[in-house]
Image: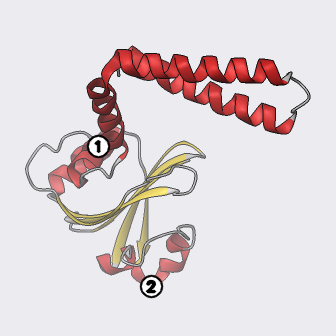
């Protein structure tokens, strides 16, 4: 991002804080000083904008918008697990974590090769536990914000749960059937 775009953003933020300050405590700064400071900030912002040119500014804004937009399933997968060894990963369902505080998790349902699941499990120290589909109350209750399609109970009679916990705010959970070709993933990051 261009320095002029950062400078313009800083001037706008300072201007907004100044307006807020003057509206909350109007007696803090005299009327002549308010007009002078306000004029200085507006003129400085205009000068920076004209100096940087609308082309650079719109280019930087476009990059920000592009980076904050929805990510592709391939991008999300590579962020979480790296690039797959084979071309055998198919995303069935995905719900991305757009706003970390409001959205608790990234939810994914995948079909993949058993060796790809093995590669993922070798990247971190996952704890393993096993459940029967009838015992789904034990493992599904802690996933209260899950999307309607996220149902590890549908993986078969025997379900493997792999959990990697960096800390209480960063937990990665993978559910797999015994054939290791269909998985449900919940990546908690608050």
In-front residue for pair 107/98: 98
Residue pictured at 35% horizontal, 42% vertical = 65
Question: Residue at 60% across / 20% down in the picture?
Answer: 41
Inspect this view and state whether residue 162 appears: no
Residue 174, picture quadrant: bottom left
User: Which element carries disc 1, helix, strand or loop?
Assistant: helix
Distance of label 1 from label 2 (alpha carbons): 30 Å
* First along the sequence among labels 1 and 2: 1
Specify few, some or many for label 2: CA neighbours under 10 Å numbering under 14, 14-19, or 20 or more.
few
The residue under label 2 is 134
Residue 169 visible within the image: yes
Across and down, in percent, residue 43 comes to: 54, 19
Discs 1/2, front: 1
Helix, strand or loop at disc 2?
helix
Decide: few, some or many residues near mark 1? Use Cα within 10 Å; few <14, some 14-19, many ≥20. Answer: some
Q: Residue at x 35, y 22 (%)?
A: 1
The residue carrying mark 1 is 81
Q: Is residue 149 left or right of residue 8?
A: left
Q: Nearer the viewer, residue 73 or 134?
A: 73
């Amino acid at each position: 991002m261009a320095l002029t775009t950062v400078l313009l953003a800083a001037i706008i933020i300072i201007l907004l804080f100044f307006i807020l300050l003057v509206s909350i405590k109007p007696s803090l700064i005299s009327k002549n000083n308010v007009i002078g400071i306000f004029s200085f900030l507006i003129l400085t912002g205009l000068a920076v904008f004209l100096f940087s040119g609308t082309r650079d500014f719109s280019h930087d804004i476009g990059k920000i918008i592009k980076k904050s937009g929805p990510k592709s399933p391939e991008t999300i997968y590579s962020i979480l697990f790296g690039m797959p060894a084979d071309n055998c990963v198919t995303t069935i369902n995905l719900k991305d974590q757009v706003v970390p505080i409001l959205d608790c998790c990234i939810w994914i349902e995948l079909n993949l090769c058993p060796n790809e699941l093995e590669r993922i499990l070798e990247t971190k120290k996952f704890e393993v536990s096993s459940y029967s589909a009838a015992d789904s109350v034990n493992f599904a209750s802690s996933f209260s914000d899950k999307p309607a399609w996220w149902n590890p109970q549908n993986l078969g009679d025997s379900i493997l749960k792999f959990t990697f916990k960096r800390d209480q705010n960063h937990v990665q959970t993978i559910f797999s059937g015994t054939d290791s070709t269909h998985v449900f993933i919940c990546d908690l990051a608050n």
